Amino acid sequence: MDRVALARTASALVARGKGILAADESTRTIEKRLRDVGVEPNVENRRAWRELLFTTAGLGRYLSGVILFDETIRQRASTGRTMVEHLNAEGILAGIKVDKGALPLAGSEDELVTEGLDGLRARLEEYAALGARFSKWRAVIKIGERAPSPYGLHVNAHALARFAALSQATGIVPIVEPEVLMDGSHDIERCFEVTETIQKRVYEELYRQRVFLEGTLLKPNMVISGQDAAPRASSQEVARATLRCFRRTVPAAVPGVVFLSGGQGDDEATENLDAINRLARAQSVPWQLSFSYGRGLLATPLKTWAGQSANVAAAQAALLERARATSSAREGEYTAGTERES
């Protein structure tokens, strides 16, 4: 393990003004999103959509990395170059989702466990050869009457740490993602309680499994009200609760946090990120606070494109607008007019 190289890559991924695009949807998920905008979900259209994203000129001004799916890291654009080569030309690092998705946890009534540890070392070695510099593993934590249980928290934290250790052994920076879902009507304090608990468990496991923290990133949910809560917490309340929670759980050795959008709308995800960074600047926190958004960056460009080659330029412009706005929020400098002014 080259610790210097791992730390350098992790720090580059949370460079000031930049964040990560999560373009790692599974085949099932991307097919659903294509259908939703009236696009036939075949291999060629999946490739065309990703090519549109990764050939957007100037995207490297706002993005440090892109998380890819297995299909994507192997694809070539119509130019003949690989998707990874197009990203690298913009100064963007390629990453890879390596988990196999969440399935029902045996012995639990309503919890999930993420699978994919079998054969992971060999897959990581192959992905490194294909150009991956970082990896991601997502654990899904539900909030319910009986969830999460100590059992569910333990198995997911253990798997995250195994993934992280194997990634670093192959020279790849792991992004550890324990996502507490927004689904439900719980209030922000319940989200705080669950987020604090899972993050503590995760860092205990990372320590036990000798993971080098300076060569990792955390991809968490914000501490936020459930989607169906009434009323829902404001962005200022989200910022206060999130930073209070992270001060209790995230070691200072971790170079950065890259928030997931987690079902938030474009505006909500941007405004909450901005509020968190404004408060963090006043409090002088030890980590860079950035983003790793999927839908928060891609929903508008996908609707704009709608599978039409004539709309590629407009969709790329929409992507740049979303990236600019989110970059501003990452610096605590977002205003509602940022995109229009751009």
Image: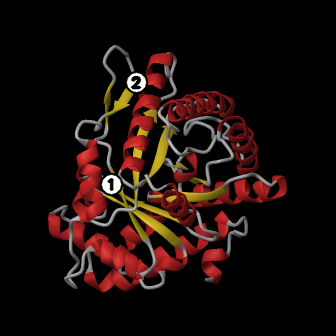
Q: Secondary structure at mark 2?
A: loop
Q: Secondary structure beneath disc 1?
A: loop
Q: Residue at x 22, y 85 (%)?
A: 79
Q: Is residue 201 visible?
A: yes
Q: Is residue 216 above or below residue 224?
A: below
At x 42%, y 41%, the residue is 165
In the picture of the structure, the residue carrying the numbered disc 2 is 111
The residue drawn where x is 58% and y is 56% is 269
**Amino acid type for the residue under numbered disc 2:** Glu
Q: In the displayed structure, does residue 196 sit left or right of residue 121?
A: right
Q: Is residue 31 visible?
A: no
- Taking the image as shown, residue 302 lies to the left or right of residue 244, namely left
Expressed as whole percent of the image width and height from the top left, the position of residue 234 reads 72, 47
Image quadrant holding the C terminus, namely bottom right
Q: Is residue 244 above or below residue 265?
A: above
* Residue 171 picture quarter: bottom left
User: Along the line of sight, which residue is nearer the eye, 195 or 164?
Assistant: 164
Alpha carbons under labels 2 and 1: distance apart: 21 Å
Q: Residues within 10 Å of mark 2 (few under 14, many from 20)?
A: many
Q: Which mark is residue 25?
A: 1
Specify whether 271 is left or right of 279.
Answer: left
**Residue 82: where, in percent of width, then height?**
25, 75
In this rendered view, identify the residue nearer to me: 228 or 90.
90
Give, as a three-letter code, the residue at label 1: Glu
Q: Residue at x 60, y 59 (%)?
A: 290
Q: Residues within 10 Å of mark 1 (few under 14, many from 20)?
A: some
The numbered disc on residue 82 is none
- Residue 121 at x, y percent in the picture: 28, 45
Q: Which one is earlier in the sequence, the residue at label 2 or at label 1?
A: 1
Q: Position of residue 295 (x, y in %)?
A: 44, 58
